Image (tube, rainbow, N blue to C red):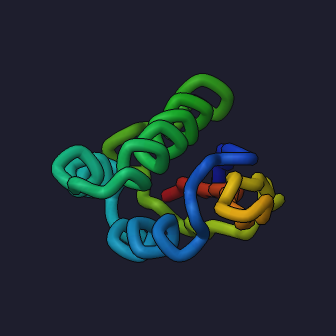
Amino acid sequence: METRANLRGVRLSVQKGRLVADLIRGKSVGQALNILAFSPKKGAKIIKKVVESAIANAEHNDGADIDSLKVKTIYVEKGVVLKRFTARAKGRGNRIVKPTCHVFVTVGD
């Protein structure tokens, strides 16, 4: 039995999200939440919410035992890139790139 949760359009770069996702892939959910709680990275807070959502989905929809759950798959994909401009000297403008990503988590036995 596998249960999914995803979060789309997160204002986080894919590279930074994947660094955090690699820390918890394959671990038990208790251990994964512990790692995420004490990680100083911005992505840890975001991914922790998605993992908690997947756990809640498994418990509510499938009646799963939380202690036996593991993070089966977790991946971070590239989302749309927001492009903004900032004013520079002599009437020019520089582009500011604001990347987004999508986080997908699957928990199961």
Give the residue drawn at x 78%, y 65%. Answer: 92
**Location of residue 76 (image quadrant):** bottom right
Residue 54 visible? The answer is: yes
Furthest-left residue in this view = 38
Q: Is residue 61 left or right of residue 58?
A: right
Residue 3 % position (x, y): 65, 47
Residue 79 visible? The answer is: no
Give the residue drawn at x 61%, y 57%. Answer: 106
Furthest-top residue in this view = 60
Identify which residue, 105 or 103, lies in the foreground: 103
Give the residue drawn at x 30%, y 47%. Answer: 33
Q: Is residue 87 left or right of residue 30?
A: right
Residue 93 % position (x, y): 76, 62
Give the residue drawn at x 50%, y 65%. Answer: 17
Residue 74 % position (x, y): 56, 66
Residue 24, above or below 86:
below
Q: Is residue 90 left or right of residue 67?
A: right
Residue 100 % position (x, y): 69, 56
Identify which residue, 76 or 14, lies in the foreground: 14
